[in-house]
Amino acid sequence: MLLAIDAGNTNIVFAIHDGDELRHKWRISSSSSRTADEYMVWLTQLMKLENISPTIITGAIIATVVPQALFPLQLLCRRYFNCMALVVGEPEVELGLEVKLDNPSEVGADRLVNAVAAQKKYGGPMIIIDFGTATTFDIIDSQGNYCGGIISPGVNLSVEALHMAAAKLPRVAVENPGKVIGTGTVTAIQSGIFWGYVGLVEGLVRRIKQEYSQQNGEQNMKILATGGLAPLFDEEISEIEVVDQELTTYGLFEIYSRNS
C-alpha cells in the first residue's frame, strides 16, 4: 500500500491508498518543529484503530509547501516504513506535464499535484480553484500542461487578519449569512467575507476564460473546486462544475504510479 503525504501550511494530510482506492485519510496541524518520532506516535495510534500494521506500507510519496517539514517526513518514511519517499518537485520525479512558466520551480508542489489529478480525472482545459490557506486558481490546457495561475489570500486567513487588525471586530465563522446587507457586526463581516469571495471567484473566472480564449483559441473551460470551503462556495457560484475534496491525494497516487 502507498502512504501519500500532503504537507500544507495549515494541515498535513496522511492518506493510505490500496491500488487506486483511497482507504484511509488523517490530518494533523502543520508544525515545523514536529519530529519523525512524533509523527509516528500519532500516526500509528490512528492506524491501530483501523487495524492497519505499518508493515503493509510498501511505498511513499510527499508533496510539501513547507520546506522545514520535508526532512522529518522523509525520515518518518525511511525509519518507520522502510521506504524512500518520492518527493514532488525533485528533478527525478516525473509529473507527466509541462510547466509553462518562466521559472517552473516557483510553482507549489500541491498545485502541480492538483493539475496532474485534474487532467487525469476530468481533462482540460480547466481552472482549478483551491480554497486553502491561500485561494489559488490554476490553469490547465487541453494537453494537461500547467499554464499559470493566481494566488489570493485564503478565506480563513482574511478573517483572521481582519480580527487581528481591527480591535473591535470579532472573529467570526465563515458561512453564508443569507443576505448581502448585514444588520449587525457579525453578519456584516460574514457578508463581506462570503459574498466578497463569491465576487472574487466569479470575476477572476470570467477574466481567466476571456484571456485564455484570446491566447489559445480554446473555450469551454471546466471549473473544478477543491479545499475545505469548496462545498460552501459551490452553493452560490454557478460556474463551479465539480467539487473534488480528494483531488490532491489522488494526484499523489497518480504521480507515484507514473514513477514506479
Image: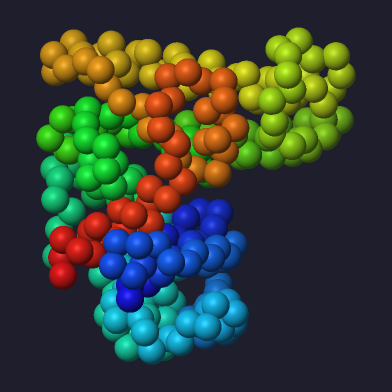
Q: Is 163 left, or right, of 102 in this rendering? A: right
Q: Residue at x 36, y 27 (%)?
A: 223
Q: Is 250 left, or right, of 119 in this rendering? A: right
Asked if 36 appears above or below 164 in the picture, the reply is below
Q: How far from the left and from the top, in percent, is residue 98?
A: 13, 43
Here the colouring is: rainbow
Q: How many marks?
A: 0
Asked if 211 appears above or below 70 in the picture, the reply is above
In what quadrant of the picture does the C terminus appear?
A: bottom left
Q: Residue at x 34, y 54 (%)?
A: 250
Q: How far from the left and from the top, in percent, is residue 78?
A: 34, 85
Pick whichever, 167 or 74, lies toward us.
74
Kindly tell me whether residue 107 is visible in this rendering.
no
The answer to which quarter of the image holds residue 155 is top right
Q: How far from the left and from the top, in percent, is residue 219?
A: 21, 15
Asked if 120 appears above or below 89 in the picture, the reply is above
In what quadrant of the picture does the N terminus appear?
A: bottom left
Q: How far from the left and from the top, in percent, is residue 146?
A: 21, 37
Q: Residue at x 31, y 26 (%)?
A: 222
The answer to which quarter of the image holds residue 62 is bottom left
Q: Is 135 left, or right, of 223 in this rendering? A: right
Kindly tell me whether residue 243 is visible in this rendering.
yes
